[in-house]
Amino acid sequence: MLFQVRMDVHLPPDLAPEARTELLAREKAYSQELQRAGKWPHIWRVVGEYANISIFDVDSNDELHTLLSGLPLFPHMDIHVTPLATHPSDVRA
């Protein structure tokens, strides 16, 4: 199942620099692990925003929720999920 996921990050302004560095390092490691596993095949920055648009390839809604809620930045994000389906005009379908 493919999902488009938009993640907008809102870090607390009073987050200590050391805590921010550690949090972002954990986020990067976790997200790259999911990318290498094929669960997160695409990620793009949204220009001018602290946000990304990603494509997830997972087996179920529950798996997607588990992966997203495991993100270290999860408590600091607004997440919007869009389920995707094959388009009838797609020449690769």
Image (tube, helix red, strand yellow):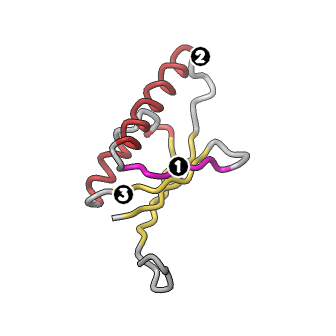
Establish if 13 lies above or below 3.
Answer: above
The region drawn magenta spans 39-46
Is 87 colored magenta in this rendering?
no
Mark 1–mark 2 Cα distance, whole angstroms, equals 25 Å
The residue that appears at 38% across and 46% down in the rendered structure is 68
Residue type highlighted by circle 2:
Pro
- The residue identified by callout 2 is 17
Q: Nearer the viewer, mark 1 or mark 2?
A: 1
Which residue is situated farthest in the bottom direction here? 88
Location of residue 65 in the rendering, given as x and y in whole percent from the top left corner: 32, 51
Viewed as shown, does residue 3 lie left or right of 54? left
Mark 2–mark 3 Cα distance, whole angstroms, equals 33 Å
The residue that appears at 43% across and 40% down in the rendered structure is 74
- The residue identified by callout 3 is 57
Upstream in the sequence, badge 2 or badge 3?
2
Establish if 8 lies above or below 70.
Answer: below
Upstream in the sequence, badge 1 or badge 2?
2
Establish if 37 lies above or below 92.
Answer: above
- The residue identified by callout 1 is 43
Total labels drawn: 3
Is 42 colored magenta in this rendering?
yes
Residue type highlighted by circle 1:
Ile
